[in-house]
Image (tube, rainbow, N blue to C red):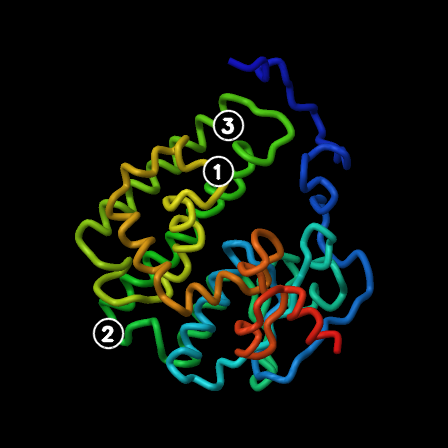
Amino acid sequence: MSDSSKYQPPKVWTWDEKNGGEWANINRPIAGPTHKTLLPQGKHPLQLYSMGTPNGQKVTILLEELLALDEQGAEYDAHLIRIAEGNQFSTGFVEINPNSKIPALFDTEADRRVFESGAILFYLAEKFGLFLPNDAAERTEVLNWLFWLQGSAPYLGGGFGHFYAYAPEKFEYPINRFTMEIKRQMDVLDRELANHRYLGGDHYSIADIATWPWYGNLVLGKAYDAGEFLNVENYKNLRRWATEILERPAVQRGIKVNRTWGEACEQLHERHDASDFELKTQDKVEARNTA
């Protein structure tokens, strides 16, 4: 066992700016902007400011699903917010999301800001009347799982993901603690999906769209390089669900938007038109945007 038990919290906590590992340069104990920068605005009704993390993917997947159903009002511009560079602390971004987290959405037609990924999914589902049932019982079940995800994902990302993959030092206790919780959460999902095709019932909804980027990627071995460590092969119902959703064309498009890592064909730094997906490499997209 690691010798972390010697640490004793000080009487009054003080901020050590250099402590925090890979993300130390953007983590701070105060809110508000750090610099003045206006956000860009495109031509479409919906302006999305995001990055292709799991929380960002939730929104781009839903937008692509809406467009696949010919909802032209869901046309959007997806502007890249480079969180490692602190773009989320600009005055423009903070005006839309005072919490300085991606994603953030501005609906130009309604002159309305929407922040927090779950709130954005709910807002868009209600706006277009899709992916959220009208029947009270079915709607409640979908919202059960949407809120389950919003409460559970921090244990996966900020808990397991941080201590297993990103923390500057590896300690046994937090890794064991969060591994136990994540495996319990996967078991919750696996048991539910043994009885239903989707979360919330028999129909694909914002509950699935919210959950897949986190737990779908995880159980398919595409997150934190932890598939073997978590023995994800055991969660057969969850893997069936994750594989089925990944096969959806709108999902395959949505996971590319605002993504800045992986193969060039997996990245679409910014999305301003459906034709952007037809370009073969990210370099061509950037060339079009700067022409």
Q: Is residue 43 above or below residue 186?
A: below
Q: Quadrant of residue 34?
A: bottom right
The residue carrying mark 2 is: 135
Mark pair 2, 1: CA separation: 40 Å
Looking at the rendered structure, the secondary structure element under dot 3 is helix
Q: Residues within 10 Å of mark 2 (few under 14, many from 20)?
A: few
Side of 59 relative to 113 (left or right): left
| Amino acid at dot 1 | Asp
- Is 90 situated left or right of 65 in this image? right
Residue 145 point in image, percent of width and height:
33, 56
Name the residue rendered at 57%, 74% in the picture. Answer: 276
- Using the image, tell me which numbered label, if any, was put on residue 142: none
**Whole-percent x and y of residue 47?**
60, 75
- Indicate whether 91 appears above or below 196: below
Residue topped by disc 3: 174
* Residue 254 in the image: above or below residue 53: below
Q: Nearer the viewer, mark 3 or mark 2?
A: 3
CA separation in Å, label 1 and label 3: 18 Å
How packed mark 3 is, by other alpha carbons closer than 10 Å (few <14, some 14-19, many 20 or more), is: some
**Mark 1 against mark 3, which lies toward the viewer?**
1
Under circle 2, the secondary element is: loop
What's the residue type where badge 3 is placed?
Answer: Pro
Residue density around tag 1, few if under 14, some if 14–19, many if 20 or more, within 10 Å: few
Between the C-alphas of marks 3 and 2, the distance is 42 Å
Q: What residue did someone put label 1 on? A: 225
